């Protein structure tokens, strides 16, 4: 998520005056952090362990409150993120809690929107693929262990057997099945595995 957008979403919470520090994070990294660096990494680890523990018993609390360094700590959980809010004083939990829930919900909405847009772009790229776009890359991989002419003949025969035209659209699942049929013609298992790894890498680039 864009840092400027996240800062804009967090501003109403930070402007309350009750907040001493805020951290927004997923499992890998902090997306926004105004907590002391020494505390932040350990805090993130502990909070994921706590919420994972709730999930194991079928509970998914939206918000948790704890004592923290003589003050208060709020934790709001989204599908993809955690929002941790350290308060100046424990008696500010109620008002900060409402604001934190609203901010967490907005982060979740923006995250869902970004995920849909990203997946939509990936799907669009895949839908625009045609066999003629992918054939040179598959031929180049096969040519690492087969003669170039033999690789070309294998691909042409497979296309014909499947009654496919080069200008027809395709997608990654079709390409994967097609590639497996081609690999069946490579005699040595070690070479097949080498080529399969290269083809898998190529297919992953089509989805990135």
Image: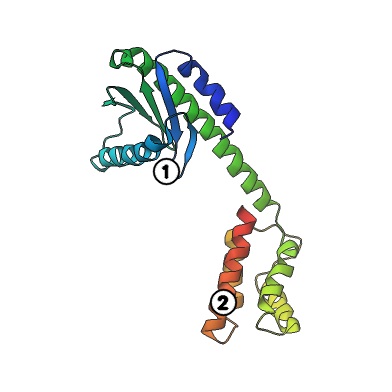
Q: Quadrant of residue 75?
A: top left
| Residue 200 coordinates in the image, percent (x, y) | 57, 66
Q: Nearer the viewer, mark 1 or mark 2?
A: 1
| Residue 31 coordinates in the image, percent (x, y) | 50, 35
Question: Which of 77 and 70 lies nearest the eye of the viewer?
Answer: 70
| Residue 88 coordinates in the image, percent (x, y) | 35, 17
| Above or below for 125 versus 46 | below
Local SS, label 2: helix
The numbered dot on residue 181 is none
In the rendered image, which residue does mark 1 sit on?
Answer: 27
In the rendered image, which residue does mark 2 sit on?
Answer: 194
In this orientation, does residue 124 appear? yes
Which is nearer the N-term, disc 1 or disc 2?
1
Question: Which of 68 and 138 lies nearest the eye of the viewer?
Answer: 68
Q: Is residue 16 left or right of residue 194?
A: left
In this orientation, does residue 160 appear? no
Between the residue at mark 1 and the residue at mark 2, the CA separation in whole angstroms equals 33 Å
Residue at the (59%, 64%) spot, across then down: 201
- Residue furthest toward the left? 57
Residue at the (45%, 36%) spot, across then down: 25
């Amino acid at each position: 998520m864009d840092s400027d957008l996240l800062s804009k979403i967090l501003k109403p919470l930070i402007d309350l005056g009750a907040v001493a520090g805020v951290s927004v994070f997923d499992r890998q990294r902090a997306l926004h952090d105004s907590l002391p660096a020494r505390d932040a990494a350990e805090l993130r680890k502990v909070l994921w362990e706590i919420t994972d523990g709730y999930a194991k018993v079928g509970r998914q609390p939206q918000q948790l409150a704890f004592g923290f360094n003589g003050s208060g700590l709020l934790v709001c959980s989204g599908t993809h993120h955690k929002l941790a809010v350290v308060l100046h004083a424990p008696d500010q939990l109620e008002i900060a809690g409402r604001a934190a829930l609203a901010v967490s919900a907005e982060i979740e909405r923006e995250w869902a929107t970004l995920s849909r847009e990203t997946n939509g772009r990936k799907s669009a790229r895949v839908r625009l693929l045609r066999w003629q776009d992918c054939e040179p890359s598959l031929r180049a991989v096969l040519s690492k262990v087969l003669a170039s002419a033999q690789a070309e003949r294998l691909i042409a025969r497979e296309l014909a057997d499947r009654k496919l035209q080069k200008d027809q659209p395709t997608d990654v699942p079709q390409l994967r099945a097609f590639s497996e049929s081609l690999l069946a013609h490579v005699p040595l298992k070690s070479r097949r595995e080498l080529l399969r790894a290269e083809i898998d890498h190529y297919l992953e680039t089509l989805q990135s």
